[in-house]
Amino acid sequence: MRPPQHDQELDASGLSCPMPLLKTKLALHQMSPGQVLKVTATDAGSVRDFPAYTQVSDHELLHTFSDDLHFIYWIRRGKDA
């Protein structure tokens, strides 16, 4: 699957839990509903945190990708931030 187009990028590389998720929440809050945020993280905890967060929020996890060093997420902002 080809990664979705995104409107904004957030590089959370090098940050430890819970900072990647907190910075993502702040970035999504500043975006308009329907826009897509691409997040790059290096914290392995993000593999658990991002899907859990999008399941309990109005946001949608569109796509994920990981390699040996990075975890990348595409999240569509919901109507409620």
Image: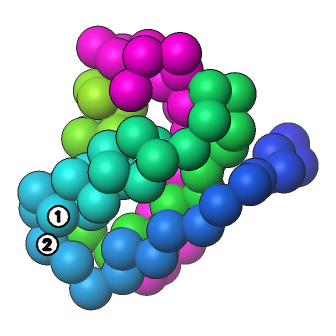
Quadrant for the C terminus, please.
top left
Task: Provide the secondary structure element on which disc 2 rests.
Answer: loop
Tell me which residue sits at (11%, 57%) in the image.
18
**In the rendered image of this protein, does residue 41 appear above or below residue 5?**
below
Question: Amino acid under label 1?
Answer: Met
Tell me which residue sits at (32%, 51%) in the image.
26
Question: Where does the image place residue 21, in percent across and percent down from the top left?
Answer: 26, 51
Q: Is residue 72 magenta?
A: yes
| Left or right of 35 in this view: 70 | left
Question: Where does the image place residue 62, in percent across and percent down from the top left?
Answer: 65, 32
Q: Are marks 1 and 2 in contact (CB under 8 Å)?
A: yes
Question: Amino acid under label 2?
Answer: Ser
Dot 1 surroundings within 10 Å: few (below 14), some, or many (20 or more)? some
**In the rendered image of this protein, does residue 71 appear above or below residue 11?**
above
Tell me which residue sits at (56%, 31%) in the image.
77
Q: Is residue 47 visible?
A: no
**In the rendered image of this protein, does residue 66 appear above or below residue 77?**
below
Q: Residue furthest bottom?
A: 14
Dot 2 surroundings within 10 Å: few (below 14), some, or many (20 or more)? some
Task: Provide the secondary structure element on which disc 1 rests.
Answer: helix
Question: Where does the image place residue 58, in percent across and percent down from the top left?
Answer: 44, 15
Q: Which residue is mark 1?
A: 19
The stretch of residues the image draws in magenta is 54-81
Q: Which residue is mark 2?
A: 16
